Image (cartoon, helix red, strand yellow):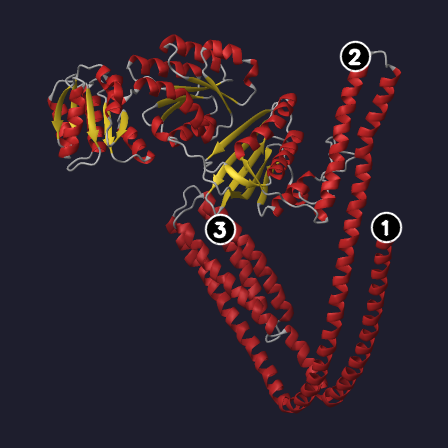
Amino acid sequence: MGKYKIYRKILSDKERDEMLHKMIKVNANIISKAITVIIILIIIVYYTITIYNSNIMNKQMVTVSEHPYTVVVAIGDVKANLMLLRALPERLTYSQSQEIVEGIRAYYDTINQSMTEKIDLLLERYLADKESVPAMQSTYLQLIEAQTKLLSIAEGEDSNAEDISAYYTKEIIPKLDKLDELSETITKGAGNKLKEYSSLVTRSKNTMLVMASILSSAMLIAIIFYMYILRLKYKAEEEMRDIRAELEVEQRANSAKSQFLFNMSHDIRTPMNAIIGLTAIAAMDINKQDKVKACLTKITTSSKQLLGLINDVLDMSRIESGKVSLNDEDFVLPELIDDFISITQLQTADKGLKMEINVSDLTHERVTGDAVQIRRILSNIFGNALKFTPAGGEIWLTIRELPPTTKGYGTYQFIMRDTGIGMTEDFIKKLFLPFERAETSTKSKVEGTGLGMAITKNIVDMMSGQIKVESEVNKGTTFTVTLPIKLQNCEEELCDFSQLYDLRSLVVDDDPIACESTARMIEEIGMRSEWVLTGSEAVKKVKIAHESVQDYHVVIVDWQMPGMDGVQTTRQIREIVGEELPIIVLTAYDWADIAEEAQSAGVNAFLSKPVFKSRLYHVMSDLTKEEKKDLSIDAENLESMQHFSGRVLLVEDNEINMEIAEEFIRYFGVDIEKVWNGLEAVERIKAVAPDYYDLVFMDIQMPHMDGYEATQEIRKFEKEQGDTHLPIVAMSANAFIEEINKGYACGMDSYITKPVELVTLYSVLKKYL
């Protein structure tokens, strides 16, 4: 029934098309006849009145058509060429190189061709006198000979500027002067002919003026009427074109859908044929359990393929009919990416592909939206990359949060890049169109409906997002999806970063992008971070830090690295520092297979790629909690605190703060010396022996020289003198991460906030003394 309606509609459009076409044709014929009659009448009147003047002017018009205008134009070109011919030889007086000579010869050839044509035209058209043009032709031939000889002189081994200039003055300039004179004569002759024509026009002007006024009025009326009729005709034709365009769009859509149904008939029959055939084989060999199991496995695969085809068609149908709506549900991005990884990990491994997922600048992890559709967007793009990337290739997914553009919404960007076969520009233009393929299903080696990207584009549009694609044949494709996603009304999980402030970390990963991203995230949660690209480098770093009593507080090492993997790296680090240092293994794969081996080697925890800030914080917090606990002490047990030996320099500009800190430090039996600003601290340290002080407590905001600058000066002095590293601990009322990181950047070792607590001070003294 639906097909009958389509044919009926097409038939109705054709009938309307033909009817309008006939109407336009009839109107055009009537208009044409009416205008023709009017114009014929006007022409007859005009012809009758002007026949006499036409006979007189006939011969003159023939003359004018050939002369003077053609002659004036030609002689103008001749004069221009003569000017060039005067200027060119001058270059030979400066240089007689082969390049200059050949350049001038090329100019001569071009000018000669032009001059020959113009002189031939003048011989044919010039009618004023019979001697000027032949004389010009003869003189120009002589000039050509002279120019040829001039070039020969220039090419000679003993040529010089004086000989060239002398020959030019004697042989060429006189001929050019004569040609100029002949040009002026021809120009005057052409002018005289023009005057004759002007006189004829003047005599005829008065007669023609009256007739022209009358005829112009009549023609104006006819033209206005004709323009009015034409406007009606063009309007009807424009309507006709619109109707035809609409009809062509409908026909193309029906043709595309017909082609799609043809493709689908093949794509559906392929898995159906497999299901039916394998079922028959299983029935024939029902007693052979292994063979039946193999058949059932293949039947399952074919069934899933068939289900995917059907789902694509149904989804596209629902989208086109407007029956798809988006859900608003709370979810967290790390869980969504986990689900995506669980689906894609086995697929990439089965095909022999490498997949890397990185997270960058992700501030808000808790959002509200349609997680299912976002996952579907990523899965469809990933499916494309998986299909068209050969074994051994790579797929990268980068997730990042851009600056927000709408209040209450975060702007998230998902970039998926592959090293596949790429796409042509023509195919990219049709990539997001439904029922379109670059290659028909019967010829393509890739399974699917071809609707995946059309569905993806529609979902992105429904989410008010954007999708862009860049591709190069045989190099790969990059899809960039930008989505505005609503942020949850609840606050992001509050994290107490203060417990991580004075901790150092080392990141080990053979991927520099992942390594740098993880290190930057660690710094965002308040820790200091360094990174290396190999296990051997990590072992060296840990050893140096341990020997200088500057141990790292945590090491994060990638599992799979060339040379020395994460487990081997862990074993070697344990041999250096023992069991106290927390070590985290970072991996994009399922760690179940190596969990026992890794833990026996000394791994404390596992962290999945991509790394999210919230997960990183929780792992770091859990692993460092015991260390913090060991270093801290309950205020009720102050009497049992141990005393320390050593000398401390206290740098503080506030008298009360100085007194409190001094009392606290002396409580633990430590000798203390005091200065009142950073400049005094630098001068004091420079004046004493290298190992005189064991520790420095440095205030930040002070007159004359603040704590940052003072620390930089002390570190510079140590480097110049080759002195050992003097621990410097900042004391500040500012607890912002930016300030803490600034302290570490200038060379401070730790950071405590005011007001200073006795237990905190005890932990610092225990660490450094």
Three-letter residue code for mark 2: Asp
Labels 2 & 1 near each other (Cβ < 8 A): no
Mark 2 secondary-structure assignment = helix
Residue picked out by circle 3: 104
Taking the spot 74% from the left edge, 29% from the top edge, the residue there is: 304
Pick the residue in front: 370 or 468.
370
Taking the spot 27% from the left edge, 28% from the top edge, the residue there is: 752
Distance from disc 2 to disc 3, alpha carbons, whole Å, reads 90 Å
For disc 2, the neighbor class at 10 Å (few under 14, some 14 to 19, many from 20) is few
Q: Quadrant of the C terminus?
A: top left
Give the answer, above or below, for where 473 lies relative to 125: above
**Of the two numbered discs 2 and 1 in the rendering, the one whose residue sits closer to the viewer:** 2
Asked which quadrant contains residue 10, the reply is: bottom right
For disc 3, the neighbor class at 10 Å (few under 14, some 14 to 19, many from 20) is some
Three-letter residue code for mark 3: Ile
Residue picked out by circle 1: 3
Q: Quick one: label 2 or label 3, which is nearer the N terminus? A: 3
Give the answer, above or below, for where 379 lies relative to 147: above
Q: Position of residue 118 (x, y in %)?
A: 59, 64
Give the answer, above or below, for where 79 lies relative to 52: above
**Of the two numbered discs 1 and 3 in the rendering, the one whose residue sits closer to the viewer:** 1
Taking the spot 65% from the left edge, 26% from the top edge, the residue there is: 390
Q: Residue furthest front?
A: 636
Q: Position of residue 234 (x, y in %)?
A: 73, 70
Q: Quick one: label 2 or label 1, which is nearer the N terminus? A: 1
